[in-house]
Amino acid sequence: GETVTIVRAAGPDQYGDPAPGAPVRIPISGCAVAPGDQRALSARGRDGAIIAYTIYVPSGSPTILHTDRIEVRGDVLEVDGYPARWTSPFTGWGPGAEVAVKGGQG
């Protein structure tokens, strides 16, 4: 598997906004990274692309929040929606979570 890194704001301030300061970096090893929707963009004479991945995080990994950013393959991307935790309805076993991430490039 690959290692991805959670890039989390230092913590909420008194108003619930990200506090100033260096973000907390939390590595997660043993992840599977699958390509997502890779779209080309063209706006105002500039070319760019949307970079997207689906990351499969193993059981027992730190919880990823919808407000986190994830560093994967050298790019720091936004979490797209809420991470989905997989759980067996029969045994309660949870093999991990699925996290969609995306961001612009170029």
Image (tube, rainbow, N blue to C red):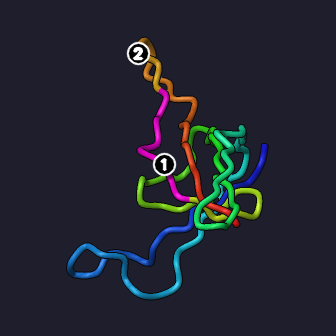
Q: Is residue 79 magenta?
A: yes
Where is residue 103, by image quadrant? Answer: bottom right
> Is residue 66 placed above or below 24 in the rendered structure?
above
> Is residue 32 placed above or below 18 in the rendered structure?
above
What residue is rendered at 47% in x and 88% in y?
21
Q: Which residue is mark 1?
A: 80
- Residues under numbered marks 2 and 1 in contact, where contact means CB atoms less than 8 Å apart: no
Residue 60 shown left or right of residue 66 in the figure: right
Give the x, y percent position of residue 39: 66, 45
Instruction: Give neighbour class at mark 2: few <14, some 14-19, many 20+ (Cα, 10 Å).
Output: few
Give the x, y percent position of residue 99: 54, 43
Magenta residue span: 78-86
- Amino acid tagged 1: Asp
- Whichever of callouts 2 and 1 sits on the residue coming sooner in the sequence is 1
Residue 87 shown left or right of residue 45 in the figure: left
Q: Which residue is mark 2?
A: 89
Q: Is residue 20 magenta?
A: no
- Amino acid tagged 2: Pro
